[in-house]
Amino acid sequence: MYAALWRILPGPWWVRLLILLILVAAVLYGLFFYVFPWASTYLNPQEVTVE
């Protein structure tokens, strides 16, 4: 799967690496600012304290 993704991307290896880093950053941004807050409304973790 990763090899197929690497072959699909255009350019030399450093351009491919830059594109992959940008894609990973975009996915993480979407998860942290959109998906996780949306999911936290449906998940109700218990309040746990450790003494």
Image (cartoon, grey):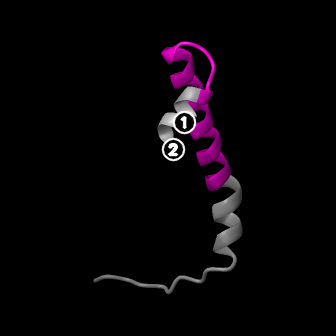
Q: Looking at the image, which is closer to me, 14 or 31?
A: 14
- The answer for how far apart the CA atoms under marks 2 and 1 are is 5 Å
Residue that lies at the very extreme toward the top in this rendered image: 12
Tell me residue 27's x, y (percent).
63, 45
Q: Above or below — where is 19 with respect to 43?
A: above
Residue 28 in magenta stretch = yes
- In the image, is residue 12 part of the stretch drawn in magenta? yes
Q: Where is residue 25 in the image (x, y as percent from the top left)?
A: 59, 38
- The vertical placement of 29 against 39, above or below, is above
SS state under label 1: helix
Magenta: main secondary structure:
helix
Apparent side of residue 14 relative to residue 43 in the rendered image (left or right): left
Locate the C terminus by quadrant: bottom left
Res 43 → quadrant: bottom right
Query: Magenta span covers which residues?
Result: 8-32
Report the residue marked by disc 2: 1
Q: Which amino acid does label 1 sit on?
A: Ala
Q: In which quarter of the image is residue 48?
A: bottom left
* Residue 40 drawn at (x, y percent): 64, 72
Residue at figure coordinates x 54%, y 13% from the top left: 12
Q: Which residue is drawn at 62% across and 36% down?
A: 23
Residue pointed to by mark 1: 4
Query: Can residue 21 be seen from the camera position used here?
Result: no
SS assignment at label 2 = loop
The answer to which of 18 and 3 lies nearer the viewer is: 3
Q: Where is residue 37 in the image (x, y as percent from the top left)?
A: 67, 64
Mark 1 closeness class: few <14, some 14–19, many ≥20 residues within 10 Å: few
